[in-house]
Image (cartoon, rainbow, N blue to C red):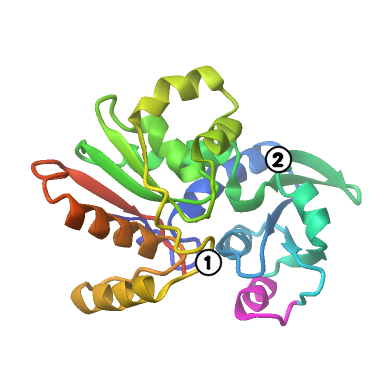
């Protein structure tokens, strides 16, 4: 397992990966601040707020849900404490704006805009470094999938003879369509998709949804291991891996398998 959850206490796992090149570009463009998007419980918002605090960069966070306030939950409170300027959008406003990327002018200042979840070319580039840091190659790489940013970074960088197993955490998610759309390079995606394996039956009802089976599995997992997984992303990955291998015990025999722990609270 690649323990990307240990990278940083607040800018954890793939959140740091996806922010790295976005922040480097913002600095190169001499931007006055960062602007990004997230839901009420967004780890991406929290990670961006923490990065801005450490680097002394002002950050605006646009949050889905006009009914929310700074005091709605501990995540939003912490973002505010870290200095993030929170703005609350209607769901329709959020839907229109959340994919923005690049430099914008706002009140006479320039901001580098990062899409929701860090889902842009800079985010993908950061996630290619997961594989570059490894000291050996693997036959299978396994990862949870949300915006597809991390999985695209992996797909671009794993060896030609390897396979990437993705576990989408959203219900009814068209994996290949979403990956193709984010990559914005049909020729490249078509050359990579033979390395892709999709296990799309382990969403347990959809994003941030759980099931008694999933929660029971996570409890049992914590009794046997000395690190934490959670029900939104990493819990579903390990549940899927355990279930598939239990049904086909020969599937991964003799194979080298790497699970990427993408962090998350």
Q: Quadrant of residue 63?
A: bottom right
Q: How many marks?
A: 2
The extreme left residue here reads: 254
- Whichever of callouts 1 and 2 sits on the residue coming sooner in the sequence is 2
Residue lying furthest front: 247
- Quadrant hosting residue 13: bottom left
Quick check: 164 above or below 6? Answer: above
Q: Which residue is mark 2?
A: 101
Residue 1 shows in the view:
no
> In this orientation, does residue 254 appear?
yes
Q: Which residue is mark 1?
A: 208
Residue 224 x, y percent position in the rendering: 19, 75
In the rendered structure, which segment of residues is drawn in magenta? 70-81
| Spot occupied by residue 174 in the image (x, y as percentages of width and height) | 54, 41
**Helix, strand or loop at mark 1:** loop
Q: Looking at the picture, how far across and down is residue 164, in whole percent?
A: 33, 38
């Amino acid at each position: 397992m690649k323990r990307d959850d240990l990278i940083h206490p607040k800018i954890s796992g793939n959140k740091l990966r996806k922010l790295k090149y976005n922040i480097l570009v913002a600095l190169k463009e001499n931007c006055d601040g960062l602007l990004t998007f997230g839901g009420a419980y967004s780890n991406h918002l929290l990670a961006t707020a923490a990065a801005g605090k450490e680097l002394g960069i002002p950050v605006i966070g646009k949050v889905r849900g006009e009914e929310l306030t700074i005091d709605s939950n501990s995540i939003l409170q912490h973002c505010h404490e870290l200095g993030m300027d929170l703005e609350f959008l209607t769901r329709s406003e959020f839907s229109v704006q959340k994919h923005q990327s690049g430099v914008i002018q706002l009140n006479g200042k320039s901001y580098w805009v990062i899409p929701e979840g860090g889902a842009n070319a800079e985010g993908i580039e950061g996630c290619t470094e997961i594989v570059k840091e490894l000291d050996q190659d693997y036959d299978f790489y396994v990862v949870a999938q949300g915006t597809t940013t991390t999985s695209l970074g992996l797909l671009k960088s794993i060896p030609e003879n390897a396979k990437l197993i993705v576990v989408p955490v959203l219900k009814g998610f068209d994996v290949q369509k979403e990956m193709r759309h984010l990559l914005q390079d049909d020729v490249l995606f078509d050359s990579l998709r033979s390395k892709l394996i999709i296990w799309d039956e382990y969403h347990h009802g959809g994003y941030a949804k759980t099931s008694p089976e999933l929660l029971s599995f996570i409890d049992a997992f914590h009794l046997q291991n000395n690190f934490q997984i959670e029900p939104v992303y990493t819990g579903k990955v390990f549940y899927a891996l355990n279930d598939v291998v239990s049904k086909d015990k020969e599937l991964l025999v003799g194979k080298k398998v790497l699970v990427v722990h993408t962090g998350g609270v």
